Image (cartoon, rainbow, N blue to C red):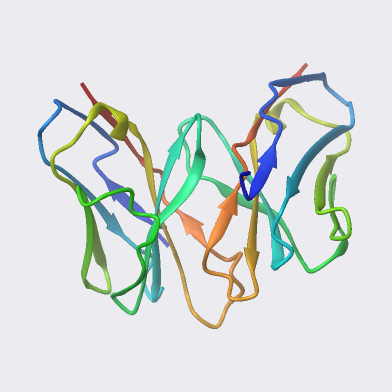
Amino acid sequence: QKEVEQDPGPLSVPEGAIVSLNCTYSNSAFQYFMWYRQYSRKGPELLMYTYSSGNKEDGRFTAQVDKSSKYISLFIRDSQPSDSATYLCAMASQTGNQFYFGTGTSLTVIP
Amino acid sequence: DAGVIQSPRHEVTEMGQEVTLRCKPISGHDYLFWYRQTMMRGLELLIYFNNNVPIDDSGMPEDRFSAKMPNASFSTLKIQPSEPRDSAVYFCASRTSGTSPETQYFGPGTRLLVL
């Protein structure tokens, strides 16, 4: 079983839609939960992160962590064509240097 | 700030050839990470350095892969001999100690194709 599972999609939504991206994990030692956005032929860029559990909101983006279910989510409200990218979840334990990434979900927002 | 710099951006080589990928971390960053990204396996950590010293190389797939960091501003990832299954995008990332782990900055990657 992989450490982190992520639905690869692809996901295609109309502009303005609410997008939900999800990952599950198996390692209960994970404490850092991150979402990266990766545009085509670019490196991943950190979008959101949460330490331990709970929710975090930043503009149109909300990250949620449910440690009891080993499940994390990223919600994008009022999605824009510029949100079209691959979204990667990543997790790390308390020591923080070993990141475990999901395989990424490809999102296309149609104008 | 120039960000993490990687070279070359693209590399096409034939099976059996030696390949050397290069990385310049952000100035002042003392952690450097090498990752490999494929469609099937996603982004995987290969090795990371702290203060130029390799800390964890458990992700290095086999002895054909080696990495060095001779100084704080330069690192190489070498594959010798290369095989078609090494075709992937290789990313370098860096961060500074004393910051949270998520403050890891990725370079643009090197796309490697081994024929």
Location of residue A6 in the rendering, given as x and y in whole percent from the top left corner: 69, 37
Image check: B107 left or right of A10? left
Q: Is residue B11 above or below residue B63?
A: above
Q: Quadrant of residue A74?
A: top right
Location of residue A4 in the rendering, given as x and y in whole percent from the top left corner: 66, 47
Q: Is residue A40 above or below residue A93?
A: above
Location of residue B66 in the rendering, given as x and y in whole percent from the top left corner: 21, 56
Residue at 14%, 25% in the rendered image: B14
Q: Nearer the viewer, residue B38 or A75?
A: B38
Location of residue A80 in the rendering, given as x and y in whole percent from the top left corner: 78, 29
Residue at 24%, 41% in the rendered image: B8
Residue at 29%, 35% in the rendered image: B86
Image check: A63 left or right of A102? right
Q: Is residue A48 above or below residue A10?
A: below
For the N terminus of chain A, the quadrant is: top right
Image check: B96 left or right of B81? right
Residue at 21%, 52% in the rendered image: B63
- Image mark count: 0
